[in-house]
Amino acid sequence: MRNYYLGFWELLVLRSIANESKFTQTIKCMKIFLIGFMGAGKSLIGKHLAARLGLDFIDMDTVLEAKEGMSIQEIFLKFGEDYFRKSEAQSLRELAGHSNAIIATGGGMPCYFENMEWMNEHGITIFLDVTVEELSTRLRSESNKRPLLQGKAPKELNGFIETKLKERIGFYSQAQFICHASYPWEELVEGLAKYFNRFL
């Protein structure tokens, strides 16, 4: 058993990797899944990290919108969350043969249809961990763009985020790495790029 550390600003692996040779083989395929709550910075960090490492960037929300021919908000409104989660899981598994990519996942994706287990089996998972207070600040101006936040008054937002995080943390914490992502995104990209560049 071995724990992995990702740099001075506390990029820390919480889950021990029992089979180090398997981990090394997986990381060389360089398929990195960024997971975390909405507003954690998965798309922003993923896009810049991919550019730094010379990898493809895949945003799962964009993939779903192209597949369904409508926005995430429209998918929720027209078909409901159950349909969305099934389509999301199917789109994720269609990436099985894709390597050399940074993949920004939806906030709820790890929590359904054994998606978290699948991502750990097929790539490297990084949980971008952001405090409730910071998430609330980031999401306050975006509530109309995000289906799960619609109709939430500013005073309700903190409670909603806190409740949802408690529901999801058991899935997020299965990630192979955890990144304390309340730092400026530029610092996060720099630290992650330095670490993963060694495997390219």
Image (cartoon, grey):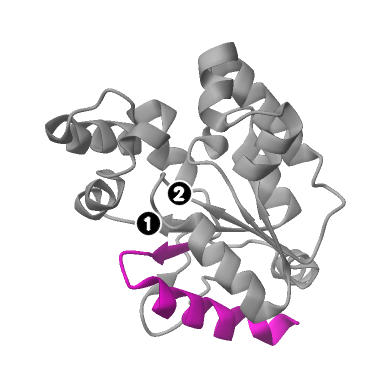
**Chief SS of the magenta region:** helix
Please report the bounds of the magenta region as a residue range.
178-200
Seen from the viewer's position, the closer of residues 125 and 2 is 125
Q: Which mark is residue 40?
A: none
Across and down, in percent, residue 144 comes to: 35, 32
- At label 1, the amino acid type is Asp
Q: Is residue 192 above or below residue 83?
A: below
Q: Which mark is residue 129?
A: 1
Q: Is residue 200 above or below residue 124?
A: below
Residue 56 in view, yes or no: yes
Number of numbered discs on residues? 2
User: Going 57% across and 13% down the picture, which residue do you hit?
Assistant: 78
* Quarter of the rendering occupied by the C terminus: bottom right
Instruction: Identify the image quadrant of residue 16.
Output: bottom right
Does 13 sit left or right of 98 as displayed? left
Seen from the viewer's position, the closer of residues 10 and 86 is 86
Q: Residue furthest top?
A: 79
Q: CA distance from mark 2 to mark 1?
A: 6 Å
Q: Residues within 10 Å of mark 1 (few under 14, many from 20)?
A: many
Across and down, in percent, residue 132 comes to: 24, 48
User: Going 24% across and 37% down the picture, which residue do you hit?
Assistant: 162
Instruction: Identify the image quadrant of residue 22.
Output: bottom right
In the rendered structure, are the residues bearing label 2 and label 1 in contact, judged by CB atoms less than 8 Å apart? yes
Q: Which mark is residue 36?
A: 2
Q: Secondary structure at mark 1?
A: strand
Q: Secondary structure at mark 2?
A: loop
Residue 198 lies in the magenta-colored region: yes
Residue 167 in view, yes or no: no
Across and down, in percent, residue 83 comes to: 63, 17
User: Going 56% across and 31% down the picture, which residue do you hit?
Assistant: 72
Does 2 sit left or right of 41 as displayed? right
